[in-house]
Amino acid sequence: MPGTSETPFSSLALLWPALAAESASEFASAVAREFIDLAIGSQPRAAQLQFTTPNKVALELTTGRLRDFSTGADGTPTLVCAPFALHRAAIADLAPCHSLVAALQGAGLTRVFVTD
């Protein structure tokens, strides 16, 4: 700018916290991926998906599956959009006493579906 002694990049100096946070986030993500690979080993990740409650694949797409945990044909369909984190969709049905699917069925829902 005419009449100021600022260089064109001096305003970028105020952005260093954002740039540092982004770099730290990328580093943390890379470290997390390494730890996941260490924990899983050379086994394919699909082999890690184990569901506690009996189910079947109701819909198979290239981007995912819709699992059917229904125990009956009547009732309101309930869709659980599971988070796609470390455990993927299996987190919604992790273990007998740690299952969202079982809790929903125990509450009387007979048609339960989970995105996978």
Image: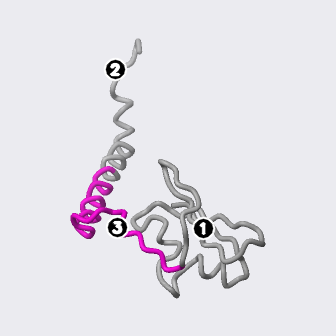
Q: Give coordinates of residue 101: x percent, y percent.
A: 59, 76
Name the kind of residue labelled 2 in the image: Ser
Q: Earlier along the polypeptide chain: callout 3 or callout 2?
A: 2
Q: Give coordinates of residue 50: x percent, y percent.
A: 42, 74
Please give left or right for residue 50 compared with residue 35 in the image. right
Point out the stretch of residues depicted in magenta: 26-53
Relative depth, front residue between 37 and 68: 68
Q: Quadrant of residue 73?
A: bottom right
- CA gap between label 1 and label 3 equals 19 Å
Relative depth, front residue between 53 and 80: 53
Query: What quarter of the picture does the N terminus occupy?
Result: top left
- CA gap between label 3 and label 2 equals 62 Å
Q: Residue furthest right?
A: 75
For mark 1, does the 10 Å Cα neighbourhood hold few (<14), some (14 to 19), or many (20 or more) residues?
some
| Disc number for residue 42 | none
Please give left or right for residue 45 compared with residue 93 in the image. left
Residue 32 falls inside the magenta stretch = yes
- Of helix, strand and loop, which one carries label 3? helix
